[in-house]
Image (tube, helix red, strand yellow):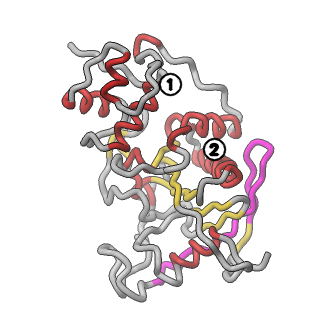
Amino acid sequence: MANILSPDRVYYITAGKKSLKINEKIIPDSARAKKNVASWCLKGDPMKPNKPLGGGKGAKGVVIHNTNDIVTAPNTDPAEQYTRATWPNCNMSGAVVHFYVYKNSVWQNLSLEERGWHAGDGSSRRDDLLKKGKIGGNLDCIAIECIGEDRESEESTAVLAAWLLKKLGLTVDNGLYTHNYFKPSKKCPEYILDHWDDFKSEVRELMGLPSEEPLDKQDYYPAAPYKGRSIVDGLKSVGERSDFAFRGRLARLNGIEDYKGLASQNSYLLNLLKKGKLKRLKLT
């Protein structure tokens, strides 16, 4: 299918036994906003950060996002249209990501060495997944936007994530992040978050890594039999406290730094609890 945009380069990647074609269309360093795009990207400003990832030391992680599916003209597809909407059309409200994925169509907008605008965490850093260092979504991570709620798009996203992690020398456990990790108020990746563990397993398999080690039962709550949607009632179902202060400490232990009792935050904690993967807060 001919697209409205033509890629500057095409290359192919492989993870496991699956391959993907990448249409590379890097936003030029010289690109300037043709109008006020966002508070951080006003008319005449650069259309991307133009700064290296990881302070010049390379990416420390891969962030998975979901964005809405869109209707396109017959001669294009959503991944190409999102690319074109970013540049040259300046219609993405300041969001600039590395990859857009729709079914088997992948478009790359940034090099693997440069920063984007995608995580909503500005220039801040927080504890990484292993609590051994600091990481920022925008500062240190490559962003993949999986378009819509579509199984084929999700499979292609897993292939791309597996290839990137392997290329960067990272694993699923120390390098694969949700947007929600860096911006807890944002339920993103919206369509993947509720089965995030399954997605991680898919990426792990594509990388040829062994299955996740079994959890130490002493460090986690038992899988809650509770079927409802309240984290308060879910915690009560396993005989645990549920007041706000306790939930704040519990949230920090499980990767949510700025707990505010938001529905997305509570849903994330409850999903872990139901799967027996919520780290237990041990009070002293």
Q: Is residue 86 magenta?
A: no
Q: Amino acid at mark 2?
A: Lys
Q: Residue furthest front?
A: 228
Q: Is residue 29 magenta?
A: yes
Distance (Cα) linking label 2 and label 1: 28 Å
* Count of numbered tags: 2
Neighbor class of circle 1 (other Cα within 10 Å; few <14, some 14-19, many 20+) is: some
Q: Residue furthest top?
A: 218
**174 relative to 127 in the view: left or right:** right
**40 relative to 143 in the view: left or right:** left
- Of residue 44 and residue 170, the one placed in the foreground of this image is 44
**238 relative to 22 in the view: left or right:** left
**283 relative to 196 in the view: left or right:** left
- Of residue 219 and residue 269, the one placed in the foreground of this image is 269
Q: Residue at x 51, y 18 (%)?
A: 215
Q: Secondary structure at mark 1?
A: loop
Q: Which mark is residue 275?
A: 1
Which residue does the numbered mark 2 point to in the structure image?
A: 166
| Residue 272 image position (x, y, % from top left) | 45, 29
Q: Residue at x 41, y 53 (%)?
A: 137
| Residue 60 image position (x, y, % from top left) | 47, 47
Q: Amino acid at mark 1?
A: Lys
Picture quadrant of residue 192: top right
Q: Write the start and end of the magenta stretch as one range.
A: 11-31
Q: Secondary structure at mark 2?
A: helix
Figure check: 78 above or below 222: below
- Of residue 232 and residue 99, the one placed in the foreground of this image is 232
Q: Residue at x 58, y 43 (%)?
A: 169
Figure check: 91 above or below 274: below
Q: Residue at x 23, y 15 (%)?
A: 283
